[in-house]
Image (cartoon, rainbow, N blue to C red):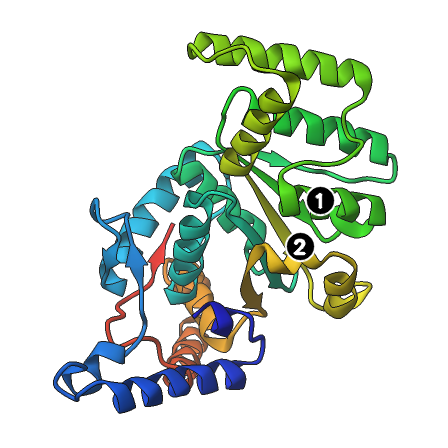
Amino acid sequence: RLFGDRLPDPADAAWCASLVEAVAAKRFPAAALADGAALRGPWLYSRWLGRAYAPARPRELRRFVASRLRTFYEEALDVPLVVFDDVVRHVLRLDAVLRAESGHLLLVGESGVGKSVLTKFVAWNGGLSLIEIQATRHYTPAKFDDDLRAAMRRAGVDRERLVVTLDEADEGSSAFLERMNALLASGEVPGLWGADDLHRLLAACRDARRSDGAADDDDAAVLRWFARNVRRNLHVVFCLNPGGSGGLADRATASPALFNRCVVDWFGTWSTNALTNVAKALVKTVDFGAIGAAEWADGLSADLAARLREEPESDDSDDDEEV
């Protein structure tokens, strides 16, 4: 599936899925595959409905995600959200990566498809702190270095589980990409720590290690301990627009770790199914009769139903939840 995730064209993704089914049918007896039922999508695995990482039914997951999003909406984000199958698939993927050591994400999709919002939700649901790098005209590489040092201290010294998000505007500078490329590759950024900063960092690391009863080792050992904590606790999420400046191919060439060290999740663009379900959720509470638009609403409902039939959801789907 990791290979399939890197395919932006739906036709290519469908080809990959059909190839998996063909290989499974060739290598395993029909009884083991339950006559194809074992490979019937969607394949959704989660820890949210139990302690084990196990298969979960889309309907149950949608209800759980809708419930958590409702709390998230009340506590952290004053934006109404609609839960449908695509949302569930993306949040499960984000959650699986952010739970892993050195788990980093590259979210590729058009602006407004929910990359940043779903990242904030998954971080909030998992108890991870979130840092958003906000680049403006006055945001210099020196300021970026200050923010990066602060994030690394929180992850490496305080051992705080942390998510740093950078959107396509933030990563436009080659200096930013060069630093993030080094961080993803090794957990360290050459030249980031000046002499004074390094002295303060070593002192903070030794204080943290002494509180754990660790020996007061030499500088190299302390820095290895710091880098190991950064790799374990710091997660980077890049949000890119496939049509942005430079192109994905140029970015991959300039920053190989950006693609080699990150799990790619293609958000793409809004599908007809996604737009239809959002429209249904937003208009279903409107009293069209009270505003003299009942006849128009009947025609709209028929059009929405036709669109849903053109692009059906999973067999296990039911009405989508509004948050």
* Image location of residue 109, percent across then percent down: 62, 64
Q: Is residue 19 left or right of residue 31?
A: right
Look at the image and tell me whether residue 252 can be seen: yes
Residue drawn 30% across and 46% down?
Answer: 67
Q: Residue 134 falls in which quadrant of the image?
A: top right
Residue plotted at (39% across, 55% down)? 92
The picture places residue 128, in percent across and down from the top left corner, at 46, 34
Of 52 and 123, the residue lying toward us = 52
Q: Is residue 135 above or below residue 10?
A: above
Give the label on residue 182, or none. Answer: 1
Q: Are marks 2 and 1 in contact (CB under 8 Å)?
A: yes
Q: Can you name the residue that lies furthest to the left here?
A: 31
Which residue is the site of mark 2? Answer: 257
Give the percent coordinates (x, y) of residue 141: 84, 36
At 57% across and 11% down in the image, what residue appears? 206
Tag 1: Cα neighbours inside 10 Å, few (<14), some, or many (≥20)? some
Q: Give 175 or 225, whichever is nearer the viewer.
A: 225
Residue 58, image x, y percentages: 27, 64
Between the residue at mark 2 and the residue at mark 1, the CA separation in whole angstroms equals: 8 Å
The earlier-in-sequence mark between 2 and 1 is: 1
Depicted 20 relative to depicted 268: above or below: below
> Which residue is depicted at the point 23% across and 60% down?
56
Amino acid, disc 2: Ala
User: Could you say which disc has been placed on residue 99 in the image?
Assistant: none
